[in-house]
Amino acid sequence: METRILSDVLGIEVTGFNASQPLSATDKARILELFLKHHLIVVRDQNLSTEQQAVFSENFGVLEGHILRQHDGKIATPVHRLTNLGPDGKPTNKPIPVANYFWHTDKSYYEVPSLTTLLHAIEIPPTGGDTQFANMHLAYDALTAERQSELADLKVEHSWKASRRNAGEEPATEEEMRARPAVSHPLVRSHPETARKSLYMGIHTSHILGKPEAKGRAFLDELTAHATQPEFIYTHEWRPGDLVLWDNRSLLHQAVANFGMAEHRRVLHRTVVRGTKPF
């Protein structure tokens, strides 16, 4: 296993490693060490079946179920495709879900949000189709002590309903809202393993509890703009075979529509591992 730092902000590349094989205790400890230190790992040159991706993902915890529905109306399986392909299998300008193209942290609308997400690049456009990641620890650290104190006790409502509304998608159904009712999480959360503080927000949020909704929404938008400045961002340029895993407790991310979405195929296999309740 060889490593290379990808940026000063976050991210490390791993080569000479085969994620389709069982992890030794030594390799697992090394991967977890890199994960906590760099928040994102890019494992190059992987050729994983969906079953092999599921097995590798389970080294980090329990795989999550989903509320997301595919084009055929079926709920996404634990290993599912993120793609710009339409029901006819051809590229389209309507990816599922649209919210992926806004800053977010996965499943923050769950009472117990995700720990890590793993994406395996199956088909990548010839150029573009990047994913950006923003370091929420650095964004928090860059705030003044006065602003940090102001944020310390604030809680934010997250919901599937708000996510779909904010992204301009069709409204959540009554069934979806019953399955995933609104939850609240601290705006500033502490990492359960490193104790570092970070900002916790994104497209899945509605408003700040105890503040007028419009005012709270504007405050969140302002904070997101601060947290996604270039100095906090690493942009991942995908290669076929990349397996990327990141810490949803530390990062926001968004897909970037910087390619001919209606011309080129972009297919990644996704798994999500359950985390712990933010505090």
Image (cartoon, rainbow, N blue to C red):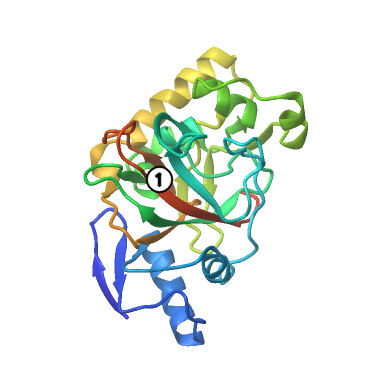
Residue 38 is situated, as x and y percent measured from the top left of the image, at 35, 62
Residue 106 or 270: which is nearer the viewer?
A: 270
Q: Is residue 127 above or below residue 226?
A: below
Residue 170 or 231: which is nearer the viewer?
A: 170
Residue 23 or 185: which is nearer the viewer?
A: 23
Please, what is the three-letter code of the amino acid marked with disc 1?
Met
Residue 207 is situated, as x and y percent measured from the top left of the image, at 57, 23
Query: Which structural element holds mark 1?
Result: helix
Residue 199 is situated, as x and y percent measured from the top left of the image, at 46, 41
Is residue 279 visible in this depiction of the protein? no
Q: Dot 1 corresponds to which residue?
A: 136
Identify the residue at horizontal 59%, vertical 19% (top origin): 211
Identify the residue at horizontal 23%, vertical 57% (top origin): 7
Q: Does 252 sit left or right of 52 as displayed? A: left
Q: Is residue 78 above or below residue 257?
A: below
**Mark 1: few, some, or many residues within 10 Å (few <14, many ≥20)?**
many
Residue 202 is situated, as x and y percent measured from the top left of the image, at 48, 34
Furthest-front residue in this view:
88
Quarter of the image where one finds residue 74: top right
